[in-house]
Amino acid sequence: MVERALEAGCRPFRALVDGSRIPPVADRFVERGGEAFVGGDQVRKLVAGLGVLHSVIALFHRPQRPSASELAKRCHRLVIVEGVDNPANIGSIVRNAAALGWDGILLDHTSADPLSRRALRVAMGTAFSIPHARTTSLIDELGAMTDRRLYALTPHADAADIRTILVPADHRRAILIGSERNGLSDAVLSFATQVRIPMAAGVDSLNAAAAAAVACYALA
């Protein structure tokens, strides 16, 4: 994780490393302007508050985020998230999007932070390589996206089967994903083509992150 942050150009602040077995990444951390401290198992356990000890834990300065409009302009394939407040789900969505070739994440202000510790761990650090933006006016941002096709995930029976959606390779697109409790709001759904992932009888929906993976693959 620390190596991926450095490779992505994140500016290091401070690190705590295993004093009995200093990892090679500590040298790179210091070379980039960060401070590194050493500690034994008990010190690192107390500072980190984690059940599993790592050879290095680190703090970085938060990278500057683009605005929602800036992100939309530079991204061909965009994943848009509304109301997903579980950091583990956000981390999985980020990892899926990065793995399947999507190039940006736009979150509303109620969704979890992709750079929170839990989200970063689940995303395996891919949040450092895929840009994201946040907005308090998701409806306004969607209204401005006249240059791309919007596809909203929903379990509604009258939504289009995602397997029937064909997107020309040169068309800009966005997938919209809502929370597992409430799904996407009616206001957001009204801006997009509603699509569903067919499921076996008796199963009404997928986890938000799993649905995002299927959609990112199907609509890539």
Image (cartoon, helix red, strand yellow):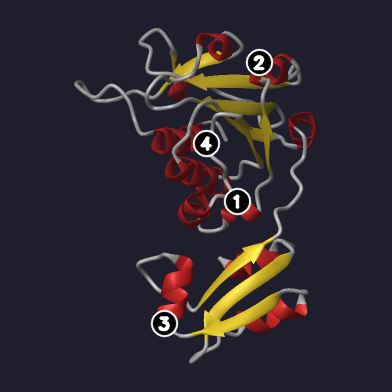
Residue linked to disc 4: 216
Check disc 3: other Cα within 10 Å, few if <14, some if 14-19, many if 20+: some
Residue linked to disc 1: 127
Q: Nearer the viewer, residue 188 or 85?
A: 85
Q: Quadrant of residue 16?
A: bottom right
Q: Quadrant of the N terminus?
A: bottom right
Residue linked to disc 3: 41
Task: Nearest to the eye among marks 4 and 2: give it.
Answer: 2
Task: Nearest to the eye among marks 3 and 2: give it.
Answer: 3
- Residue 139, which numbered label? 2
Q: Which of marks 2 and 4 precedes in the sequence?
A: 2
Q: Which of marks 2 and 3 precedes in the sequence?
A: 3
175 displayed left or right of 72: left
Question: The residue under label 4 is which amino acid type?
Answer: Cys
108 displayed left or right of 28: left
Q: Are marks 3 and 4 in contact (CB under 8 Å)?
A: no
Q: CA distance from mark 3 to mark 2?
A: 49 Å
